[in-house]
Amino acid sequence: MIRAFRIAAAGLVALALAGCAGEAVWDSDEAVARATYVPAGPATVTLITSINTRNGSGAHSALLIDGAQRLLFDPAGNWHNPGVPERNDVLFGMSPGYMDLYLAFQSNGVFEAHMHTVEVSPQVAAQLSQAVQAYGPVAPAFCSRSITEILSGTPGFETISPGFFPDNTMEQFAQLPGITYQLVEGTISDEANGSEEVLAAQVAGTN
């Protein structure tokens, strides 16, 4: 019954948003070059999923690619920072400090961020990096759809089925061999989601 409802809901979302694209953003070559962050260690891919702790539903999906440089594919995401250049939902220069800010945003209030990481070859990381940059701006509610479409065509991720639901995407990704897991719990106890307040405070603190 739940699966049938999800299929029907996904169809309604697709119909409602057919022909609708996200907002195009394209920061300069200079800004991107200045912000480039090269992570240490092997190439990895991390699925970041924001989950509502009250009902277990998925709120958002993002994909962190650590290859020749670090890219965060944050499709239809609302987080932004003056120090982080963006090109159509791909965020550059996500150093550990900026990642902490991003995860604080995704895990505040009633939400928590689930991070599933798998080691990949440099070639796979390069392929994913190219794919997210070529995908284009993502429409609202298509965060998981865009990520699963990209992953399903990538070596090692062929078992991922395209879909609209972040919690389902997380469950599929968690079944991949070699996964490591980290939970980031929110620190804001407000009854309502405090995302906008967190974002405003973060931006103000970087000016």
Image (cartoon, grey):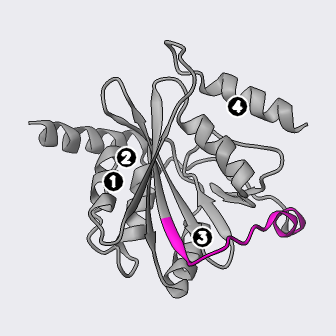
Extreme bottom residue here? Answer: 123
Please give left or right for residue 48 compared with residue 162 in the image.
right
Asked whether the beta carbons under mark 4 and mark 1 sit within 8 Å of each other, the answer is no
Which residue is pictured at 55% across the width and 66% down the height?
135
Badge 1 crowding class, 10 Å Cα cut-off, few under 14, some 14 to 19, many 20 or more, is many
CA separation in Å, label 3 and label 2? 21 Å
Q: Is residue 137 magenta?
A: no
Residue 50 % position (x, y): 45, 40
Q: Which residues are magenta?
A: 30-45
First of labels 4, 1 by sequence position: 1
Please give left or right for residue 98 compared with residue 149 in the image.
right
Q: Which residue is mark 1?
A: 169
Q: Which mark is residue 66?
A: 3
Q: Which mark is residue 166?
A: 2
Asked whether the beta carbons under mark 1 and mark 2 sit within 8 Å of each other, the answer is yes
Residue 107 % position (x, y): 53, 35
Front tag of 3 and 2: 3
Element under disc 3: strand
Judge whether 72 appears above or below 167 on screen. Answer: below
Which residue is pictured at 30% across the width and 39% down the height?
12
Which residue is pictured at 87% across the width and 62% down the height?
31
What amino acid does circle 1 point to? Thr
Front tag of 3 and 1: 3
Element under disc 1: helix
Residue 130 % position (x, y): 59, 76
First of labels 3, 1 by sequence position: 3
What amino acid does circle 4 point to? Leu
Which residue is pictured at 75% across the width and 27% down the height?
200
CA separation in Å, label 3 and label 1? 20 Å
Badge 4 crowding class, 10 Å Cα cut-off, few under 14, some 14 to 19, many 20 or more, is some
CA separation in Å, label 4 and label 1? 26 Å
Q: Which mark is residue 199?
A: 4
